Amino acid sequence: MDIIYHGHSCFEIRGQKESLIIDPFITGNPQAKIGVKDIRVNYVLITHGHGDHVGDALDIAKRNDATIVAPYELATYMGWKGAKVHPMHIGGSRQFSIGRIKLTQAFHGSSDVNDAENKIVYMGMPCGYLITMEGKTVYHAGDTALFGDMRLIGELNSIDAAFLPIGDNFTMGPEDALLAAKWLRAKLVIPMHFNTFRIIEQNPEEFVLKLRKEGISGEIVSSGEKLTL
Ligand code: NI
Ligand code: MN
């Protein structure tokens, strides 16, 4: 499979026949190098309702006739806006045409914040994703704090690549992400959710160096870059 990073928490995964995108924050994402119109996917996975994760999900799903996979409340909300949706929830997994998708817990919020109207719509629990396709398993942690059951996720799954937030402030910072990496025992760790905005500025090189000191391989993928697993 090919993994293409579009900055922030947005990853595209291309298999031999089908592809998916996770947290497609393209419009307004200063790191994104792709146009929404150039994205061809069969599935759109969203970890939670915040704008920097839902992003262009609706537009992309409609253009591609793709299915949005998200926690129940968020999926329902996207369905009301006219998208084809498949609701799931934490701990649940399902075999889709592209592969097996399982929702993992994440410690964070999930809401649609409408600044213009001072209105917040809550969307239940945020999540992470375990995606198994073509013999490989990828873990996208979503926006989350460090939690002890990442050990369990590591024990129960043989993770080929883990995407972990390192931005701090809203999610794990680099130190907690280092612990997460150890517990998950992933073959490769890719940092995400950093340097998009000033408040989540981090030094990814330092993070990857620390990973290597622990015997974990880490790689910084720049926006637009493709990595083959
Ligand atoms: Ni968030
Ligand atoms: Mn976020």
Image (cartoon, rainbow, N blue to C red):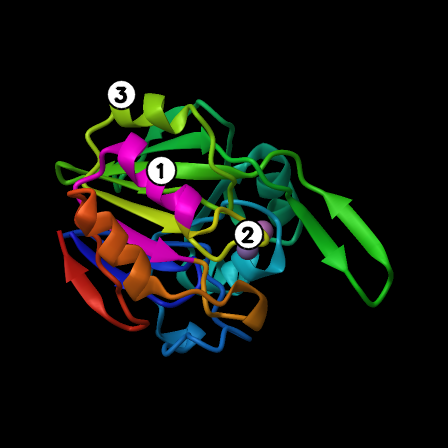
Q: Residue at x 26, y 65 (%)?
A: 221
* Three-letter amino acid code of the residue under disc 2: Ala
Which residue position is annotated with label 3? Answer: 156
Is residue 180 magenta-colored? Answer: yes
Going 67% across and 40% down the picture, which residue do you hit? 123
Q: Is residue 134 above or below residue 157?
A: below
Residue farthest toward the right in the current orientation of the protein: 117
Please say whether residue 176 is one of the residues in the magenta stretch: yes
Give x and y (percent) for residue 28.
55, 75
The residue lying toward the viewer, choosing from 116 and 66, is 116
Counting residues from the start of the chain, the first of labels 2 and 3 encountered is: 2
Query: Looking at the image, is 172 positioned above or below residue 114?
Result: above
Foreground of the two, 9 or 70: 9
Which amino acid does the dot numbered 1 rest on? Leu
- The answer to whether 80 appears left or right of 100 in the picture is right
**Residue at mark 3: C-beta within 8 A of ligand 1:** no
Residue 19 appears in the picture as rendered:
no
Q: CA distance from mark 1 to mark 2?
A: 37 Å
Q: Position of residue 3 (x, y in %)?
A: 23, 57
Residue extent of the magenta highlight: 175-192
Horizontally, is 69 left or right of 185 in the view?
right
Residue beneath disc 2: 83
Q: In the visual, does 204 lie left or right of 186? A: right
- Judged from the image, the quadrant occupied by ligand 2 is bottom right
**Callout in the foreground (1, 2):** 1
Q: Secondary structure at mark 3?
A: helix
Work out whether 92 lies above or below 99. Answer: above
Between 140 and 175, the one nearer to me in the picture: 175
In three-dimensional space, the C-alpha distance between marks 2 and 3, rounded to whole angstroms, equals 33 Å
User: What number is the disc on residue 179?
Assistant: 1
